């Protein structure tokens, strides 16, 4: 039976609202729920999302798309009345985007989330809500794994690098405040370096950037010395975890890490992508100052403790990282082949 399954094992057809649903993770959530037989409404202002991300199911009879900014969308009350679940994925993301205009980051990421909660509290207090946060909120933890109960340490205000982290931390506090006031059915998820189809390197995402460079035979640009380490999780696993958390009453009111606990350095990542792509691309190291045009301080590692996720959902990853890379390399080659054919025909 094509329907979402709740924690009791009972099949039910959901009405799902996804803000930022034409974005990277949002588009995968939409695709997953449509395949389950659910009805999906997407709202996206397309500032970073793209209609290409939803082209494969754009004409699906159970999909509605609204081009609108979540801060001003007039249909939000009706959508909240209609929805059984909301994934609030609308946000300004990517280091380059964050550094270019911190004001937009704060306005969209905080005010947008507050509006979601304010409308939900009066329109549909029973709605299931997933509020994405980020591993960025952990700041400078010296622990080998980041746990949901860790203290958070951020740098002083003159470091613009941490504006995104502050905005996401504010979203977490908003979620817990509304949970306390109205018993909102909300789960906060701290996402760790999600990768996969539809992700763009335009705003500084490392995996699509490296794959594009490797397939083109260009140097892979590594910021700093490449010793900084990250844990990467395939988006097709991430959306399954979010679905399971959303429908589990025991997860409501909780903050949960979502990602993979397998960590590798950025240099190791670059070397692996060159190997999997069969590329001759060299590695090129540039300073953070040259990359971002200002002083920049990075996390040296970002590895989640995912025991809470496993405990709440029984979730285990389906996609191995090498399989993800092979899939993305093949997609990039196919994209370039289509692009070259189009240019040849038009030329």
Image (cartoon, rainbow, N blue to C red):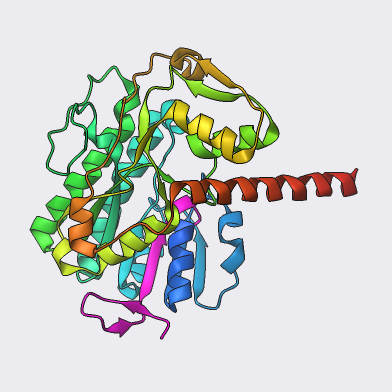
Work out whether residue 27 can be spotted: yes
When asked about the image quadrant of residue 37, the answer is: bottom left
Q: Which of 138 and 211 lies nearest the eye of the viewer?
A: 211
Q: Position of residue 316 (x, y in %)?
A: 31, 59
Q: Which of 95 and 174 lies nearest the eye of the viewer?
A: 95
When asked about the image quadrant of residue 288, the answer is: top left
Quarter of the figure with the C terminus: top right
Residue beneath the point at 42% across and 31% down:
95
Residue beneath the point at 42% across and 39% down:
93
The verdict on residue 104 being magenta is no
Q: Which of 325 and 105 lies nearest the eye of the viewer?
A: 325
Look at the image and give the residue range highlighted in magenta. Answer: 1-25
Rendered view: 68 above or below 232: below
Rendered view: 278 above or below 50: above
When asked about the image quadrant of residue 226, the answer is: top left
Q: Position of residue 187 (x, y in %)?
A: 22, 57
Rendered view: 292 above or below 152: above
The verdict on residue 10 being magenta is yes
109 sits to left or right of 188:
right
Q: Position of residue 46 (x, y in %)?
A: 53, 50
Q: Residue furthest left?
A: 180
248 sits to left or right of 278:
left
Quarter of the figure with the N terminus: bottom left
Q: Residue furthest bottom?
A: 1
Residue beneath the point at 39% across and 45% down:
91
Work out whether residue 203 can be spotted: no
């Amino acid at each position: 039976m094509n329907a979402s399954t709740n924690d009791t094992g009972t099949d039910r057809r959901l009405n799902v609202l996804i803000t930022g649903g034409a974005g990277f993770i949002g588009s995968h959530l939409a695709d997953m729920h449509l395949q389950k037989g659910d009805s999906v409404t997407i709202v996206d202002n397309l500032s970073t999302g793209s209609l290409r991300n939803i082209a494969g199911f754009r004409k699906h009879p159970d999909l509605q798309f609204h081009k609108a900014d979540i801060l001003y969308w007039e249909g939000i009350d009706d959508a909240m009345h209609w929805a059984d679940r909301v994934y609030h994925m609308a946000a300004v993301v990517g280091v380059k985007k964050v550094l270019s205009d911190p004001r937009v980051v704060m306005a969209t990421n905080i005010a947008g989330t507050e509006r979601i909660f304010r409308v939900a509290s009066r329109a549909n207090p029973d709605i299931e809500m997933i509020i994405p946060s980020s591993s960025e909120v952990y700041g400078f933890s010296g622990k080998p794994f980041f746990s949901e109960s860790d203290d958070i340490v951020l740098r002083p205000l003159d470091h613009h690098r941490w504006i995104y982290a502050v905005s996401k931390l504010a979203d977490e506090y908003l979620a817990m405040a509304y949970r306390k006031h109205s018993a909102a059915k909300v789960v906060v998820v701290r996402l760790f370096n999600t990768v996969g189809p539809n992700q763009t390197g335009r705003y500084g995402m490392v995996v699509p950037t490296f794959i594009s460079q490797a397939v083109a035979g260009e140097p892979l640009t590594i910021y700093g010395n490449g010793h900084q380490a990250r844990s990467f999780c395939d988006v097709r696993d991430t959306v399954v975890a979010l679905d399971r958390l959303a429908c589990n009453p025991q997860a409501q009111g909780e903050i949960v890490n979502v990602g993979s606990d397998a960590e590798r350095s950025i240099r190791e990542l670059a070397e692996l992508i060159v190997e999997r792509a069969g590329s001759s691309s060299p590695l090129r190291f540039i300073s953070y100052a040259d990359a971002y045009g200002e002083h920049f301080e990075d996390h040296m590692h970002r590895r989640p403790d995912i025991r809470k996720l496993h405990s709440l959902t029984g979730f285990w990853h389906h996609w191995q990282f090498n399989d993800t890379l092979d899939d993305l390399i093949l997609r990039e080659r196919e994209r370039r082949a289509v692009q070259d054919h189009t240019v040849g025909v038009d030329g």
